[in-house]
Amino acid sequence: MSTTLDVDILCIGAGGGAYPAAFRLARAGRRVVMVDPKGVMSGNCLAEGCVPSKAVREAASLWTRAQHFARFGIQRTPAVDYGAVVAHKDAVQERRYVQHAEELKAFGDRLELVKGVARFLDERRLKVEGPNVDREYRAKQVIIASGADITIPPIPGAENCLTSRDVFALNPSVRSLPDPLLVVGGGYIGLETACFFRAFGVKVRVLEMTNQLLPGFDPRMVMELGRLLDSEIVVTLNAKVETIEKTATGFKVWYSRDGRRESAESAQVLIAVGRSPVIPEGSERIGLELERGGIKADEAQRTNIPGLYACGDINNQAPLFHAAVRQSLVAAANILAGTAVDYFDRDSVPFTVFTLPAAACVGATPLTASRLGINVIEAAASLSEDSRAQILDETGGEVRLFFSSGSLRLIGGWVIGLDAENLISEIGLAVARGLTARDLAEFPGQHPMAAETITRAARSLF
């Protein structure tokens, strides 16, 4: 028989959209329960996303750089030990799980993590079922942070293919290089993974259904990045995959393009067509409003039902771990205040495509600004003139900044090439704080680091 427990806050999920709020609320004396089917903290980011994929990415980046500088007499290794790369990735995940467990333990009985699945019985009552739990909870507030899951398209044979989970999960099924590899989907997950494996010597082909890689990103940025990617990654655009057949040697993928039916064969196929929000059972029955496949929330992270908040991938505002963390803290502040006192600013959230090299953007681009009637002044600096890029012999790419005409307030920017993943946070902070071209131009960016390229770009306007 199930029992009922009263708590102050119940978090559906234990990832970036949940545990920062849970920590803050527990520190404030609230009784908090997190419910997550994994039974561990950090959600999909640590389980199969950001952290493990970037562990592999950094290994691929260092491998590429080491091979480049082998001309100095450094011994060139004939082939990468991909099993060792996976072991490193696994070790990072395990270390962080231990770290999170210690963080959780410090809260004592104010914060509990329950392994299970939560479903709404009504607006404040939830049923939680799991391996060791069958219980009803009554909560004063609920934070819905159930995240997103891999989308498997309705393509015959797709169920037999690899996904990012097979590559990046702890103790993954892929422990040797899948060569050759065909990637279905040219979004950031598919393109990043294609770059990692290509760096390790795998023959890679990407099929993208739309007319550009990275659909949804500014076409100018994508075009500039495309010139810097490994030219041996074969990309086919406007390719709609129709069926995937198993063969004696792997797979045969049939797709249509320009009215013709074509095929490609590969040892392995990776499906990477995106992720979809995981809507808790009972959400629609209690009247939660949905939007674009997720739960609708405002900038204060409030849903249409008072006392229910939605944070992270579930609300589709910015499907990124660091955005989820910020949203989680916004929800916590508003719960503690009893009213909206904090708001999420989606316009200053940086987004990096961790290809080799990377491309990163934040805020508005001229394309998005024009739709809002904002006149833009651009400032740019090429990495070909940057000292750090010259030192590392990685001179492709640029820093490009977008300012509102008149005020010259920074409204967005992108970085393509060396250190893009780091530089974009500096630009994002400037966007969030409303800095101007003059502010950036007068700041002494450190030499010889690529960050001084931001200063140099802004100085070009004066």
Image (tube, rainbow, N blue to C red):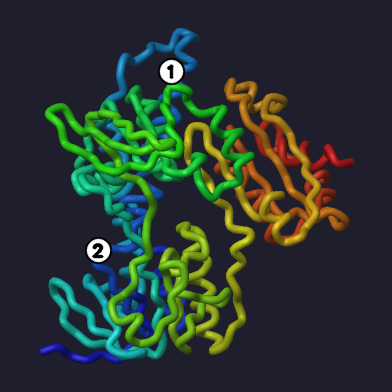
Picture mark count: 2
Locate residue 28, reporting x and y percent. Answer: 47, 82
Tell me the residue that label 1 is attached to. Answer: 67
Sort mark 1 into few (<14), some (14-19) or many (20+) by Cα contacts within 10 Å: some
Residues tagged 1 and 2 counted as in contact (Cβ below 8 A) = no
Residue at 50% from the left image edge and 43% from the top image edge: 214
Residue 41 seen by the camera: yes
Locate residue 140, reporting x and y percent. Answer: 39, 90
| Quarter of the picture holding the C terminus | top right
Q: Residue furthest left?
A: 1
**Residue in the foreground of this view, choosing between 377 and 207:** 207
Residue 171 seen by the camera: no
Q: Secondary structure at mark 2?
A: loop
Locate residue 257, reporting x and y percent. Answer: 40, 36
Classify residue 73 as left or right of residue 116: right
Residue at 32% from the left image edge and 55% from the top image edge: 150
Residue at 25% from the left image edge and 42% from the top image edge: 243
Tell me the residue that label 2 is attached to. Answer: 38
Sort mark 2 into few (<14), some (14-19) or many (20+) by Cα contacts within 10 Å: some
Locate residue 21, reporting x and y percent. Answer: 45, 73
Type of the residue with mark 2? Lys
Q: Which mark is residue 283?
A: none
Q: Secondary structure at mark 1?
A: helix
**Residue in the foreground of this view, choosing between 14 and 28:** 14
**Residue in the foreground of this view, choosing between 369 and 325:** 369
- Marks 1/2: CA–CA distance: 39 Å
**Residue in the foreground of this view, choosing between 108 and 448:** 448
- Disc nearer the start of the sequence (1/2): 2
Residue at 40% from the left image edge and 26% from the top image edge: 199
